[in-house]
Image (cartoon, rainbow, N blue to C red):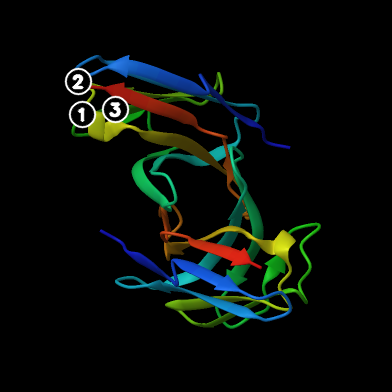
Amino acid sequence: KQEVTQIPAALSVPEGENLVLNCSFTDSAIYNLQWFRQDPGKGLTSLLLIQSSQREQTSGRLNASLDKSSGRSTLYIAASQPGDSATYLCAVRPSGGYQKVTFGIGTKLQVIP
Amino acid sequence: GAVVSQHPSRVICKSGTSVKIECRSLDFQATTMFWYRQFPKQSLMLMATSNEGSKATYEQGVEKDKFLINHASLTLSTLTVTSAHPEDSSFYICSARAQGGGSPLHFGNGTRLTVT
């Protein structure tokens, strides 16, 4: 059974700081991994999707890496802004026919002005 | 980008009534949609996988007669909470995936259900 862990559970940083969020998973047989952000009381917004054959994806100030063999992914946020404050979740989709995605609990990020 | 619209965003109903939540993919066709429930400070709990034109696949412990799912078209899935009770109060979120093996999941904005 796939288990997804996100560390830290919460993080508070001053504005402008670069930061790294971690996601680890127990079963390396994945199809892809996706990072989301969730604002309070809202749904999830897709940030980056990394296919199992890829090592990283970038979008603006965000960079996500994937090391499938070690079961790890990181989300790097450069020059953090107060608007980045949200909960960040990673989700792992398994390889094979079954489509069930496993989510981590998330890292709650607060960027202090 | 791909947009998933979920409606309503909030609903308050009385115990014993039924509530329908709609999930629409606005600019893509979704053969598969997913319904989740989220509890405070917990991860998303998959309730069921909805496939267009066929019966939904429910996760263990989810009552299919209580949570009715209909996926009548490639752009619309509905979740009906029947005979709602206060313990059904929660945040319900749908997601959809476009056709194509490596497509990402896209989520609606969720529905906050409060049963009084």
Residue A112: x %, y % from top left: 28, 21
Looking at the rendered image, the disc whose residue lies closer to the viewer, 2 or 1, is: 2
A83 horizontally vs B52: left or right: left
Residue at 22 percent across and 19 percent down: it is A15
Looking at the rendered image, the disc whose residue lies closer to the viewer, 1 or 3, is: 1
The amino acid on which the numbered mark 1 sits, given as a three-letter code, is Arg
Residue B35: x %, y % from top left: 58, 62
Q: Which residue is mark 1?
A: A61
B4 horizontally vs B80: left or right: left
The amino acid on which the numbered mark 3 sits, given as a three-letter code, is Asn
> How far is the residue under mark 1 from the one under mark 3?
7 Å
CB atoms of marks 2 and 1 within 8 Å: yes
- Residue A20 or residue A39, whichever sits in front: A39
The amino acid on which the numbered mark 2 sits, given as a three-letter code, is Ala
Looking at the rendered image, the disc whose residue lies closer to the viewer, 2 or 3, is: 2
Which image quarter is the C terminus of chain B in? Answer: bottom right
Badge 1 and badge 3 in a common chain? yes
Image mark for residue A79: 2
Badge 2 and badge 3 in a common chain? yes
Which image quarter is the N terminus of chain B in? Answer: bottom left
The image shows a total of numbered marks equal to: 3
A54 horizontally vs A93: left or right: left
CB atoms of marks 1 and 3 within 8 Å: no
Q: Closer to the N terminus: mark 2 or mark 3?
A: 3
